[in-house]
Amino acid sequence: MKKLLLAASAAALLAGSWLAPAQAEYLKEHRGGTIRLLARSAAGTLDPHINYTDQGWQMYQPIYDGLVAFRKAEGVDGFSIVPDLAEAMPQVSNDGKTFTFKLRKGIKFSNGQDLGVKDVVASFQRIFKVSGPTSGTFYAGIVGADKCLADAKSCTLEGGVVADEAAGTITLNLTKPDAEILYKLALPHAVILPADTPAEDMGSKPIPSTGPYMISAFDPNKGMTVSRNPNFKQWSEEAQPEGYPDVVQYDFGLSEEAAVTAIQNGEADWMFDALPSDRLGELGSKSMDQLHISPLSAWWYAPLNTRMAPFDNEKARQAVAYAVDRNTLVKLFGGKVLASPVCQVLPPDFPGHEDYCPFTKNPGAKWSAPDVDKAKQLVEESGTKGQKVTIIVEDTAISRSIGVYLQSVLTSIGYVADVKPISSNLQFTYIQNTNNKVQMSVTQWYKDYPAASDFLNILFSCASFREGSDASINISGFCDKDIDAQMQKALDLGVTDQKAADKLWAAIDKQVTDKAPAVGLFTPKRLDFVSKRVGNFKFNPQFNWIITQSWVQ
Amino acid sequence: MSSQVAAMPRKTRGPWAVAFAKLATDRAAMASLAVFLIIVLACFSAPLYAKWAGTDPFASTLDAVIQVDGADVPVMEQTTEGLGLGYTPIGPTWRLGNYFLGADSQGRDVMARLLYGGLNSLLISGAATIFTLIFGTLAGLIAGYFGGITDTVLSRLLDVLWAFPIYLLAISLSIVTIAQGIAIGPIEIQSGSLWLPIIIIGIVYIPYVARPIRGQVLALRHSEFVLAAINLGVPGRRILWRDILPNITTTLIVFVPLMMALNMLTESALSFLSIGVQPPAASWGTIIQDGQALLYTRPLVALVPGLAIAVSVMALNVFGDGLRDALDPRSKVRLGRD
């Protein structure tokens, strides 16, 4: 692992030295102006240790920093980890259980305070003190995390995060090696905040930041103003480059239709929400140069409850997987340009992904066509024909469409199906809770970081299933002890040999797909519509469009 | 004076006959009734229309191809220009039985869904009206006639219901029941059942009927003929049934079209918010919701059901006004023959 980290650092230095002159030149030419963004609503709390939304995470990128960061680059490079507030990649010792970071000197928060090791310790404690949504998963492997999870208020992470004020180092001790810990440290939930930040959800109150920008105004009903951090001096172009616009003005409340019109008229520069489906044709033909299509590591899927009839029967689950016409679903999502059919869990071009599709007319690597006859036969064999199935979907146009289509499919193979749209705010937690007796649902999973475990282990491990909880992300309730053991093995293997681990993840992906605890529907793509004045559009595979690396003048 | 003299020989006509005669002369009311009846007939012919058109208004038909002017046309047309993004459902063909109003985002015949949607909207608003009238009348009769603690308890209960904004209450009840349905003892209503919106809408409007009925019953309770009946020892149940109920019948009749119009609007609103009629079933509200995503390219999908609601509600309201005028003995509407 150490070797891998050193290689990554060398590559980062090389790439950085190539980029530097170009950025300086462009900055001279394009620096300044206000970039105007639109979203139907705010992303929730401003607190980066708590906010767990794509919208929030994307906006935090030029504002907050962790010890390490995902490189602010396009393509696969964007998945690589580079040192951010740490001077260099950490020294790894104690068989991969200890990570020592040396903090950069001279960095100040936007309020003028100096960044110090005490801020790092306090920030790690705060992840637990505010009961961050991933404190019990991503960061549970830090020594002392168990005590913090049991009693958040008195969290010290004693022995887990150790600061050496004189040396300017922070040592992170884990209870066991974790191949994905650097990814987890690069997420907004592990950014470094001032030590005196209150240990509570800060809601609408901005927290001082270290990045090139800071949140200067926020009203969840109106908008957010992000302006330059007067104390920022660029320390690493690949981790935290200086941005082009002086101000990012993010307004909330406009409908998607109105947002499209505003961008067309040059009154706004970008919209967060998906483009309305009835404008796609027009925009795709008249505003091609303003559209950017980018792949996403995401999965639209239909979890089948493996603990309830009829889908406690494997054949019944496989029947649905055979019957679903992925091309139709792709059509509902906007066509082949915006989505690709899938059968398996891991998205294309993702670590551990190997093309695999057993549930198609000609089983093999790719999905070709639905096999309704086979599906009907499996329904007969399972003895579940005529049973009632309710599909719970989000109350959005696309989810409702998919739900109605799946209802048709289930009816055609012999079930009595109906579909229930539930408010988008409630649906995701509703379908997780076993008390709601959800048989089938439609949902999406977007990666937290680029690791196969973020799909397979999180969505289908026995530990991810919690009876009667709103936070039971294993929606299918799937638990296979053998597959679980293999996932643990793959996680352990990743510490020493990531390639071998990915090979094992590929095998696990196939096994989970065969058991059909969920029906893979399609992999979506991100469609960004920007105004004519936006230049230098860069799409990072981890956090999407790098907003402040685009210019507006 | 002359009209009074002329009306003398007609004294033998009953009040109902007079009312119907009055109503028959109200052109606006009769035209509204005709419009509404045409809508009802059209909606009840939905299954026949779907069969004749050979279309299933509840199944996704995204890959369907139809013939228009001898040419094969896909129901969902892919954009071919530029990046080739998105699919657009076929627009109106203006040919009955062949996607007359075009298709929705699932490739379903909008005309067939409009008729089925109307059928559900009418059934729900009609049944909810009956529900409201039965329970509202019952509550009004009991509270107004028995008075005392019965009146206090019933009136406060109605006040509680009245205190909530109608739509807020209906939405709240719908959200609570929409996922799991209702199960109270032996009564079990599935979440997709039409009975759910019927009961919810029926409940929220009970105070609107019960309160005026209670007021009328209170007045009637102290009228001479009721007091006489009480003094003669006639049982209260009989007085309510034989003496009071007939005297509030005209009010109840006037309530029917007006409540139905209100219920239709409420049902459409709930269905538009996905908490009324559940997909793939249709109501005018759900079709408007489906059409919302197509406003830019296929505005008719949302506009036509909206128009259907507007016309139906207007027809019911105008007819209700006419009915009220006809049944009101103090009405200044004159019979043409008088």
Image: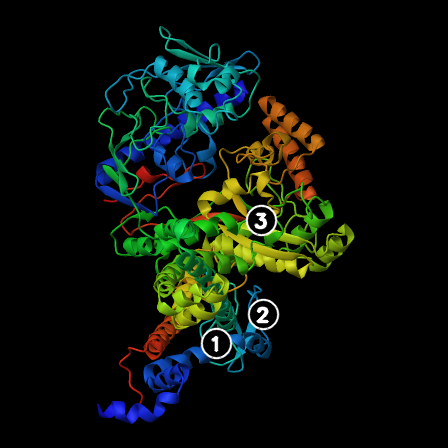
Q: Chain of mark 1?
A: B
First in sequence, mark 1 or 2: give its number: 1
Mark 3, residue position: B184
Marker disc for residue B40:
1
Work out whether disc 2 and disc 3 sit on a shared chain: yes
Q: Chain of mark 2?
A: B
Whether pointer 2 and pointer 3 mark residues with C-beta atoms closer than 8 Å, the reply is: no
**Left or right, residue A66 beside residue A231:** right
| In the rendered image, the vertical position of residue A356 relative to residue B229, given as above or below | above
Which label lies toward us, 2 or 3?
3
Report how far apart the C-alphas of labels 3 and 1 lie in the structure.
34 Å
Marker disc for residue B56:
2
**Left or right, residue A470 beside residue B246:** right
Report how far apart the C-alphas of labels 2 and 3 lie in the structure.
35 Å
| In the rendered image, the vertical position of residue A232 relative to residue B226, given as above or below | above
Which residue type does callout 1 highlight? Val
Q: Position of residue A190 (x, y in %)?
A: 42, 25
Marker disc for residue A200:
none
First in sequence, mark 2 or 3: give its number: 2
**Mark 2 closeness class: few <14, some 14–19, many ≥20 residues within 10 Å:** some
| Residue drawn at (69%, 46%) of the image | A309
- Label 3: state its secondary structure: strand
Question: Which of these two is toward me, A356 or A327?
Answer: A327
Quadrant assignment, res A89: top left
**Mark 3 closeness class: few <14, some 14–19, many ≥20 residues within 10 Å:** few
Which residue type does callout 3 highlight? Ile
- Here the colouring is rainbow
Quadrant assignment, res B301: bottom left
Can residue A343 be seen here?
Answer: yes
Question: Which of these two is toward me, A48 or A67?
Answer: A48
- Label 2: state its secondary structure: loop
